[in-house]
Image (cartoon, rainbow, N blue to C red):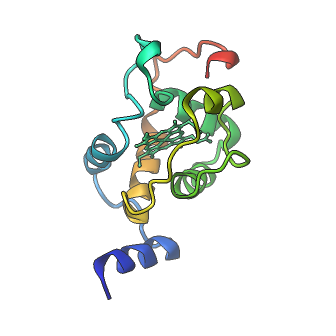
Amino acid sequence: MKTIQKALLIGTLGLATSLFASADAEKIFDAKCAACHIKTMPTDRANMIAPAVMGVTRHIKMAYPNKEDAVNFMVDYVQNPTKNKAICMPQKISKFGLMPSQKGNITPKELREVSEWMFDNFPPANFRGRGMQNH
Ligand code: HEC
């Protein structure tokens, strides 16, 4: 069985619990997500190509306060984004477009680690939302 198929299988079975240090998850995020989702508070909104990770995670937590539900949502969405599923405000999608599927770019196992890391680390304690219309 090819490695990619194994990874898909493991991810699908949900065996990929995050036994790994979050540093690994952050590295995966940096390599595969940070090009679009910046980790810092956005200062230059005009040049953003996707919502910042703190805003995204904040909204996900509002819709899915339970970690397991939030992680399951992210794992699914990142591989199969659709307008109907998105919890992002509709104007985010009209501004940035729908997120391109990351299927093949990240394994389900990596994605689960990244999603757990996002849930645990964002939004940062000092984050203040700028109001619903901005996120
Ligand atoms: C090519 C740019 C790009 C990359 C790479 C990217 N994203 Fe996104 N992402 C977007 C855009 C644009 C949106 C906002 C529109 C939407 O929600 O589909 C978004 C939205 C999201 C959302 C919110 C979904 C919702 O409910 O609306 C999550 C969660 C997310 N991304 C996670 C990730 C993760 C995790 C990675 C890395 C594996 C990643 N993204 C990589 C562009 C990207």
| Residue at x 50% of width, y 47% of height | 100
Q: Quadrant of the C terminus?
A: top right
Q: Position of residue 15 (x, y in %)?
A: 45, 73
Q: Position of residue 23 (x, y in %)?
A: 26, 45
Report whether 66 appears left or right of 7.
Answer: right
Instruction: Return the residue nearer the eye: 62 or 104.
Output: 104
* Quarter of the view holding residue 134: top right
Q: Residue furthest right?
A: 84
| Residue at x 36% of width, y 57% of height | 105
Q: Quadrant of the N terminus?
A: bottom left
Report whether 4 appears left or right of 67.
Answer: left
Q: Is residue 74 above or below residue 61?
A: below
Report whether 99 appears left or right of 132.
Answer: left
Number of numbered discs:
0
Q: Position of residue 2 (x, y in %)?
A: 30, 83
Q: Residue furthest bottom?
A: 1
